[in-house]
């Protein structure tokens, strides 16, 4: 997605060979017009998938997910992150390890909001090691919901998450796929259909 | 705002005289079309205020704030909540006490994203005791930014936050103002101009 790649080139900061900071438009400050374009793009890619609900995770997934929900005409549910949950009653819960922060969080969704009737689109800001996405897929499985696919804003293709999740047969649509952050430079993967 | 009041009547659950649960469209599941209407309403109320940026707080403030940002044509910054911050370098930080959760969190914003040039609109999902809003106002003050006002989705008018903040001279626009949750029933305040 060109507008997104341009924004990453213009405002992204490469902090290391593995860390790209996009705090100025996605993870702390949010660019609403770009989020609208991203939402429209996800909606267009999953238009035929009979999505009934979008599943995402707080906080940076919310803006792109709500825009996608607007254009697909479906509600969005965001998983909550907590260090450890004591009240897991009436919740689907899964553990997510963050390699960047070196911590493990429980993520959870109320059983009120996903069911075996749902066809889910999972949306998240980043795909790197795939831990958050695996956690969301696990919650979908607990609910007996179907997953039409995952819409990712930025995939770091040099980390293993995308490969692992595609090997499970999950359709993953990433709007920007980065092949390398070496030498402080962002390199994008050429777009491949059904990437 | 009628669409919001209708939604509260239809889907809100009164858990006690002080707690209204709106998990089905605002705090856990999000209704994107309603968020769009809310965003347009905030944009219309603050159209003449020369807003340069919207300030909100994760997670439930993000959806209405991003929609307001879309229609005002300005970026959104969301404050992050953390139990305690060790790295406060290059951050504006303020303490926010949650009466519902009986805990105190630091909220913070990178100094990169607000400055003394900004005219801020602060958006949040709920206004009750006013602690989150006071924290955001404090951060705006640290940055030397001006605050045009606060846009609140649901104000619990029987708690003191709204009064305290209006007494400080801050314009507060609440889209739904609840005067009572007694006997399990939601009562709205009649709309008053410049509330």
Image (cartoon, coloured by chain):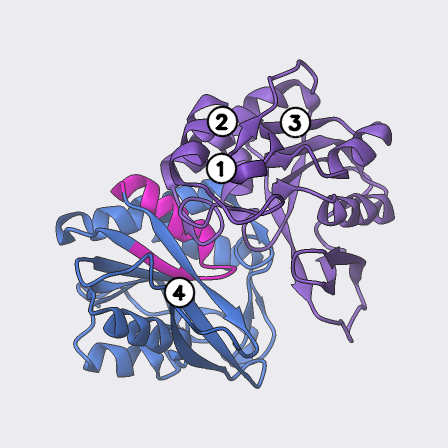
Chain colours: A blue, B purple
Q: Disc 3, disc 1: CB below 8 Å? A: no
Query: What is the secondary structure assignment of the residue under circle 2?
Result: helix
Q: Residues within 10 Å of mark 2 (few under 14, many from 20)?
A: many
Circles 4 and 2 on the same chain: no
Mark positioned earlier in the residue sequence (3 or 1):
1
Sequence-wise, which precedes: disc 3 or disc 2?
2
Residue at mark 3:
B173
Which one is nearer the viewer's eye here, A3 or B145? B145
Chain holding disc 3: B
Q: Pinpoint the chain carrying mark 4.
A: A
Residues marked 1 and 2 touching at CB (< 8 Å): yes
Q: Are marks 3 and 2 in contact (CB under 8 Å)?
A: no
Could you confirm whether marks 1 and 2 are on the same chain?
yes
* Subunit bearing disc 1: B
In the rendering, at what x and y percent does residue A44 appear? 23, 46
Q: Which residue in the structure is indicated by mark 1?
A: B67
The answer for how far apart the CA atoms under marks 3 and 2 are is 13 Å
Q: Nearer the viewer, mark 4 or mark 3?
A: 4
Quickly name the residue at label 2: B40
Classify mark 4: helix, strand or loop.
strand
Quarter of the picture containing the C terminus of chain B is top right
In space, the residues marked 4 and 1 are separated at their CA atoms by 24 Å
Marks 3 and 1 sit apart, C-alpha to C-alpha, by 16 Å
Residue B121 location, quadrant: top right
Q: CA distance from mark 1 to mark 2?
A: 7 Å
In-image side of B128 versus B187 (left or right): right
Is residue A58 covered in magenta? Answer: yes
Q: Give the magenta part as a residue range.
A: A54-73
Tell me which chain the residue with mark 2 is part of: B
Question: Is A142 displayed left or right of B19 in the figure?
Answer: left
Q: Nearer the viewer, mark 3 or mark 1?
A: 3
């Amino acid at each position: 997605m060109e507008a997104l790649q341009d924004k990453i080139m213009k405002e992204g900061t490469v902090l290391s060979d593995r860390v790209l900071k996009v705090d100025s438009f996605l993870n702390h400050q949010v660019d609403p017009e770009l989020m609208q374009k991203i939402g429209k793009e996800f909606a267009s890619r999953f238009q035929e998938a009979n999505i009934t609900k979008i599943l995402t995770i707080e906080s940076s997934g919310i803006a792109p997910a709500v825009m996608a929900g607007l254009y697909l005409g479906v509600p969005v549910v965001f998983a909550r992150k907590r260090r450890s949950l004591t009240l897991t009653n009436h919740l689907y819960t899964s553990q997510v390890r963050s390699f960047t922060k070196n911590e493990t969080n429980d993520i959870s969704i109320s059983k009120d909001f996903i069911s075996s009737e749902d066809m889910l689109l999972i949306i998240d800001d980043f795909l790197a090691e795939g831990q958050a996405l695996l956690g969301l897929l696990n919650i979908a499985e607990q609910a007996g919901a179907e997953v039409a696919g995952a819409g990712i804003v930025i995939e770091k293709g040099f980390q293993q998450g995308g490969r692992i999740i595609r090997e499970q047969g999950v359709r993953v649509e990433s709007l920007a796929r980065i092949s390398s952050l070496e030498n402080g430079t962002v390199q994008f993967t050429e777009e491949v259909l059904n990437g």
